[in-house]
Amino acid sequence: MELTKNIFFNTDKLVANTTVKISYTGKLFQEDAKEVFIHYGFGPDWNNVADVKMEKTELGFQAEITLDDSPSFNFCFNDGGDSWDNNDNQNYSFIIEELPTSLILQGDELGLDAKPGLRKAYIWSKKIRLAVYKIITYLPKLISGNYKRKINNED
């Protein structure tokens, strides 16, 4: 997801108490900086300020950040020296959303003695992964004719 030019997150939304990967391909990357740090904080007062060295890849500089339950995620970038990318002195700021409670199952909603707090999306992702695995594994064998059903020989 691209939230602004040259800054990408690995998720559609920034959600409280989750970890996100941020990729940066802005000014410092384009100027071939040897290293880049993300300087960040939370909320309007920049609480819990931290600096994290980002990993340089072919796709830009990347780092994983754990978001807290503040209303916003604020950050800027520097090269460890005097060069900064701070959005023309405005810094980058994005809203952090709360986890929707509609995704949390309570009690026996699944009908299989579900533990409280299981998310519907998690259950569906498991079912979809299993179906895709079976298709990838068995469909090519069926098409090529190399699928042999095991037959029990009773002597």
Image: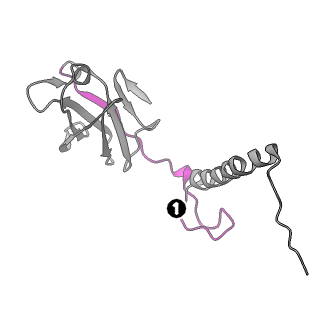
Q: Residue at x 40, y 39 (%)?
A: 14
> Is the magenta region chiefly helix, strand or loop?
loop
Q: Quadrant of residue 109?
A: bottom right
In this rendering, the count of numbered labels is 1
Residue 24, position in %: x, y? 31, 29
| Residue 1: in magenta span | no
Q: Foreground residue, 15 or 65?
A: 65
Instruction: Say above or below: 30 vs 120.
Output: above
Q: Residue at x 58, y 63 (%)?
A: 106
Disc 1: which residue: 117
Give the left or right position of residue 78, taking residue 147 as reference: left
Instruction: Say above or below: 88 vs 74.
Output: above
Q: Foreground residue, 93 or 66?
A: 66
Image quarter in which the C terminus is found: bottom right
The amino acid at mark 1 is Gly
Image quarter in which the N terminus is found: top left
Give the left or right position of residue 46, taking residue 134 as reference: left
Q: Residue at x 38, y 30 (%)?
A: 8
Which range is magenta?
89-118
Instruction: Say above or below: 87 vs 43.
Output: above
- Residue projecting furthest to the left: 82
Residue 19, position in %: x, y? 36, 47
Instruction: Say above or below: 68 vs 154.
Output: above
Q: At numbered mark 1, what does the secondary structure look like: helix, strand or loop?
A: loop
Q: What crowding class fits label 1: few (fewer than 14 Cα within 10 Å), some (14-19), or many (20 or more)?
A: few
Residue 42, position in %: x, y? 25, 41
- Residue projecting furthest to the bottom: 155
- Residue projecting furthest to the front: 155
- Residue projecting furthest to the right: 155
Residue 127, position in %: x, y? 66, 54
Q: Residue at x 20, y 18 (%)?
A: 88
Q: Foreground residue, 86 or 22?
A: 22
